[in-house]
Amino acid sequence: MKLVASARGDTAIIVASVNLKINGDTATNYSATYLQGNSSTAASGRTSSSTADGTMSEDGANATASTFGAMELYFPNYNSTGSKPFFDIDITEHNSASGGFSLINTGSHLYRGASGITSITLTPSSGNFVQYSNFYLYGIKNS
Amino acid sequence: MATATMVPIATQTLGSAAASITFSSIPGTYTDLRLVLTGTGSAASSIPALRFNGDSATNYSDTPIEGNGTAASSNGSNSSNAMWLWGSSASASTSIPTFYAVDIFSYAGSTNKTALGTYAGDFNGSGTVDVAVGLWRSTAAITSITLLALTGTFSTGTIATLWGI
């Protein structure tokens, strides 16, 4: 399963976080290890035993106007009844003479829920997705 | 007329542990290939490497970038006997599945073959994320791909799928 999004939030920030929850699960079943480049340096960090996966990014209201972050997530074997790894890459390209930064971010994610994935919920860490944000979910068959 | 973008070529689900998984007789009728492996291993070092057409000569190189939760790093290998596509801290788990995906470009062409790999191995407090570019210095069309466990075996239930694009 593949999720592709083009998203921008209305909170006054350049790069905003996006939270992901699977099957409405709010237990501490999410973790991630991420790798980022911001046009200047590369860095890595992680989250563990979180109640949502908040390591994806979108453009915020202070990013260049009419610019949307791009996000791709890949969920292999999403019907598994064991822990489920997934992968994402997201970019928030920003151009501003007043500073700020663009971000390329990629992550290794783990959802330790024991049910197959039947729903995915994306929410901005604060505020709302703006108009013209779009989200596509694709199923991928192996036979 | 629209056609399917990703066409399944074959899937292998391990019924018992195996040190390698091979896709053979790959038709040359697609533009690119995508290979996805999800599963566990017998040891932390049971992470996958690739060989094409059974070539075990030193025709492979790769350059990964890796995040280990603390820092970003990059290294590389040249003249290797397999293509690794992950960084120095990448690892497998005996209990938590990892995700390994490789896009192989112009696999049926007559130039050297490039690949883009991703490895997702988060273990809730440890693990890495890896992205890498690889090169197989051969002008032969790819007709078989072997996934090798670096050491040990891929565990029962591990799933590998090859798509043509």
Image (cartoon, coloured by chain):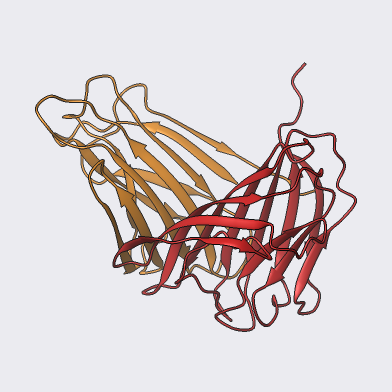
Instruction: Work out which residue is located at the far left of the displayed protein and give it.
Output: A98
Side of A59 relative to A77 (left or right): left
Residue in front for this viewpoint, B75 or A120: B75
Write down the colour of chain B: red
Query: Total number of numbered labels?
Result: 0
Residue in front for this viewpoint, A19 or A35: A35
Residue in front for this viewpoint, B52 or A47: B52
Where residue B101 appears, as percent x and y from the top left, is 61, 54
Where residue B156 appears, as percent x and y from the top left, is 73, 77
Instruction: Work out which residue is located at the far right of the displayed protein and give it.
Output: B25
Side of A139 relative to A99 (left or right): right
Where is the C terminus of chain B found, in terms of image quarters?
A: top right
Vertical placement of residue B53 versus A67, above or below: below
Where is the N terminus of chain B found, in terms of image quarters?
A: top right
Side of B42 relative to A42 (left or right): right
Q: Is residue A122 visible?
A: yes
Side of B81 relative to A100 (left or right): right
Residue at x-position 77% and y-position 77%: B18
Chain in orange (letter): A
Where residue B88 appears, as percent x and y from the top left, is 46, 70
Residue at x-position 71% and y-position 69%: B148
Where residue B130 appears, as percent x and y from the top left, is 47, 59
Residue at x-position 90% and y-position 50%: B25
Q: Quadrant of residue B33?
A: top right
Vertical placement of residue B32 versus B37, above or below: above
Q: Is residue A78 visible?
A: no
Q: Quadrant of residue A80?
A: bottom right
Instruction: Work out which residue is located at the far top of the displayed protein and give it.
Output: B1
